[in-house]
Image: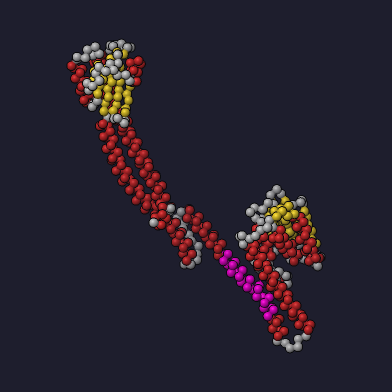
Amino acid sequence: MKMNFKFFKSLRFRIMIILVIIGIIPSVAVEKGIVNSYEDRAVSLRSFGVKNQCDILVNQLIKEQYLNDQSSEGINSELTMLSNVYSGRILIIDQDFRVIKDTYDIDRGRYMISKEVVRCFTEGKESSIYDRKNRYIEMTLPIYQGLEEKQQVSGVLLISVSTEEIVASIEILEQKGLMILLIIAVLVLGLGYVLAGILMKPFAKVTRAIEDITDGFQDEKISVPDYTETELITDAFNKMLGRVKSLDNSRQEFVSNVSHELKTPLTSMKVLADSLVGQENVPVELYQEFMQDIAEEIDRENKIITDLLTLVKLDKKAANVNIETVNINELLELILKRLKPIAGKRNIELVLESYRPVNAEVDETKLTLALNNLVENAIKYNVDEGWVRVSLNADHKYFYVTVADSGKGIPEESIDHIFERFYRVDKSHSTEIDGTGLGLAITRSAIMMHHGAIRVRSTEGEGTTFSVRIPLTYIG
């Protein structure tokens, strides 16, 4: 039952439905059109034939003055014959609306007042009505006083003709049409099922290829160029596959880097501790030096763990964000005030340029962490007696913070990797400059959490500029 329901939701079933609509519905319309056309044509021919016979009969009635004397055997027999030929009934009505002749001999002597009869008397107009439900054609023809003068109507000939033969022919046509439609329906469904299967084969190839990759049987890109759509799907899948592989490689590299970064301080502490344990009568000065080194390694380990925990919290989709309206000018002034002593040790000038007051809805703690990392990096990787310029501007939608420095700059091949975790531009000096390699990754995550963006421009040997854009109003 589940499989059947699944089939009804499939593209194959929908293609069949489209083919049925295209193949059967027009056939039904054509069949109905043919039947209706035949009916109209048959009724028209029957009316035309009856009209000709009645015109001749009316002329004879006028010539024989039948309205005054109904004893003419020739006309009476002709009326009877015409009635029998068309399986109908003929009434002749005089100017008093009285029936003077009825081929069925039922209403003779009675009065016949109908809309068509009255109109025929008053306007001298003929009428012809086809009653499909009761299966007859009814016609009225005026009978004038004379053949030459057709001004005054002295009587009306009313004839009702059966259309049973036409209806019988229509029923035969409908039966044959129904049989043809059934044959067409079976052919369309059969061919539609087969054709839909052929059309769906490329999509089945895509599914199998994806399943093979999922099961680990295939590690290459897939290609199904049968249709433009399958080619687009496979291209998109290959891009996604490449992205997944890249993320997997990044994950493995991240785990490796984490292991290395956490292990390095532990190794140093183990070496220092073993050195102390392996010596007797260690001088107090050497003991204190080794313990100070161990304390520094513990602080380094603690900083790595703290940064990792911060990064994990920022990576969570449901991370807690405490949004409040913050004065960004004051926030930047506070950050530069905290970092000024560090910059002062190397005579690096810190400059804040605020172009206008800016208030924005942000998480103050996380934004402070992000901007602090940018300014601190600008100081760390700067030259002695250099400068760091921080600027703040805004428009109606965003506020912009740029952090520019006069440092060594970033090599072009490293710019695309600086936001990766544990990535260090100059690995040879990674131990000389304090840091975990997680600062920019934390900064990027904090800015993305605010639905912002960060860009970097750098020229090696000249300096680096980080540009941050964040919405003034937080979008939850």
Q: How is the image coloured?
A: secondary structure
Q: Looking at this rendering, what residue extends furthest in the left direction?
A: 73
Residue 302, image x, y percentages = 69, 71
- In the depicted structure, whether residue 93 falls above or below residue 386: above
102 vs 26, left or right, is: left
Q: Quadrant of residue 161?
A: top left
Decide whether residue 253 is among the magenta residues: yes
- In the depicted structure, whether residue 270 falls above or below residue 197: below
At x 29%, y 35%, the residue is: 170
Q: Which residues are magenta?
A: 246-270
- In the depicted structure, whether residue 390 falls above or below residue 44: below
Q: From this viewpoint, is residue 110 visible?
A: yes
Quadrant in the picture for the N terminus: bottom left
Decide whether residue 258 is among the magenta residues: yes
Q: Looking at this rendering, what residue extends furthest in the front direction?
A: 110
Along the viewing direction, whichever of 176 and 326 lies nearer the viewer: 326
At x 36%, y 53%, the residue is: 194
435 vs 156, left or right, is: right
Along the viewing direction, whichever of 219 and 148 lies nearer the viewer: 148
Residue 205, image x, y percentages = 44, 59
Q: From this viewpoint, is residue 466 visible?
A: no
Along the viewing direction, whichever of 75 and 424 lies nearer the viewer: 75
31 vs 217, left or right, is: left
Residue 145, image x, y percentages = 28, 11
At x 68%, y 51%, the residue is: 473
211 vs 432, left or right, is: left
In this rendering, the count of numbered labels is 0
At x 27%, y 30%, the residue is: 163
Quadrant in the picture for the C terminus: bottom right
Dominant SS of magenta comes to: helix
